[in-house]
Amino acid sequence: MSPLVSILIPAYNAEEWIADTIRSALEQTWSRKEIIIVDDGSTDRTLSIARQFASGSVSVLTQPNQGASVARNKASSISQGDYLQWLDADDLLAPDKIEKQMQHVSASGSARTLYSSAWGLFAYRRNKAQFIATPLWEDLPAAEWLYRKLKLNLHMQPATWLVSRQLSAAAGPWDGRLSLDDDGEYFCRVLRASDGVRFVPEARVYYRSSGFSSLSSVDRSDKKLESLCLSLKLHVACLRSLEDSERTRAACVEYLQRWLVCFYPKRLDLAKELEELAASLGGRLTVPRLPWKYEWMRKTLGWDVARRAQVWVPRLRWSLVRSWDKMLFRMGC
C-alpha cells in the first residue's frame, strides 16, 4: 500500500482564505491522504468554515489561542501519516505537489531525505504568482543548504517541504517559545536530522503574501523581537553543529549583522546579545546603517523615527499593490 500523507493546517483568523486552502489539500492527486486542521482560538469564522469540510478524511480541531507552533504540534500528535505536509491557512498547493514529491520518495527509498519544491509569491491572483529560483532550489547536503540560507539570507516557504515521520520524530516538536520564524528554526532541526535535501522543481506551492498583519512580519513588539533573537541564536547553533568551520562562522556573523537593525533602537539589550555571539564566532557586529532613503532621517530625526518610516512606508506601498490585485481578482482578470 502506498504511504499515507498527513496534510497539517494550523489556522488563526483566516476566514478569508481557509476554504481555498482546504480545497487545495482535498484536490491533491495523491489519493492516500488525511487532512487535519487545528484552529488556534480564532475570533472570526475560521472554525465554522473549516467545519464545513469535516469528513472521514478531514479532521477539524480547536484549542485556546496558544500560537502556531502549539497548533502544529497538536496536529502532528494525532496524525497517522508516513509523511507530513505542512500547510499554512492562507497558502495553496498545486494539485500534484505531493504526488510529484512522492514519486521521488519511491525512487530514493530513504526516509531520511528531506524533499522541497518550488514556491511562488502572490496576493490574490494565483496565476500571477512569481516563481523566482534561488541557490536553495537544488539538491544539497544539509550543511550546505543551511550555510547558503544564512550567508545569502534566503528561505523556503514551509509548505514546500515533505517530511517523513522518521525525520519529524528525530527533529522533535515545534518550539512553542517562538512566535516569529518558528518554521525557520524547526526546519533547521529537520535538516540536521536528514541525509540531505532533494529539490523537486515540478512540485509547486503558492505562497500568499497576506500583508503586514501576518504573524511572520517583523514589527516592533517585544514578543516578536525576543522570538527573532532566539531564532537567530538557534540557527547559528544548528549550522555549527553540522559544520563548524571558518566559512560557516563567517556566514553566521553576516547573518547576525543583517538582522541586527531590527533591534534598533527599541531592544538594544538583544542587540548586545547578538554582538556577544558574533564575538564568540570571531567576528564583530557594527552599528547598522539604514538604506539611504531612511539614513538621512536617522541622522536628523533619530533612530526611532527612521525605523518607524522604514516599517510603515513598505506597508503602505504593499497595501496599495494588494488592493489593486484584489480588484483585478474580483474582476476576473
Image (spheres, helix red, strand yellow):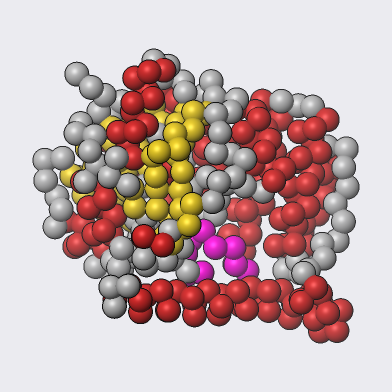
The answer to whether residue 181 shows anywhere in this view is yes
Q: Residue at x 29, y 55 (%)?
A: 21
Residue at image x 28%, y 66%?
15
Residue 265 point in image, percent of width and height: 76, 69
- 314 shown above or below 121: below
- The one nearer the camera, 102 or 62, is 102
Q: Observer-nearest residue: 110 or 7? A: 110
- Using the image, determine if residue 78 lies above or below residue 223: above
Based on the displayed image, in which of its 4 quarters is residue 185 positioned? Answer: top right
Toward the bottom, the furthest residue is 301
Q: Residue furthest top?
A: 109
Find residue 273 and report its horizontal and vertical position in percent: 77, 50
Most foreground residue, 11 or 206: 206
Name the image quarter holding residue 104. top left
- Check the image and report above or below for 242 versus 27: above
Residue 170, position in %: x, y? 47, 24
Prevailing secondary structure class for the magenta stretch in the rendered image? loop
- At x 37% / y 55%, what residue is drawn? 91
| Residue at left offset 54%, top offset 63% | 217
Q: Which residues are the magenta region?
A: 212-221
Residue 42 visible within the image: no
The quarter in which the C terminus is drawn is bottom left
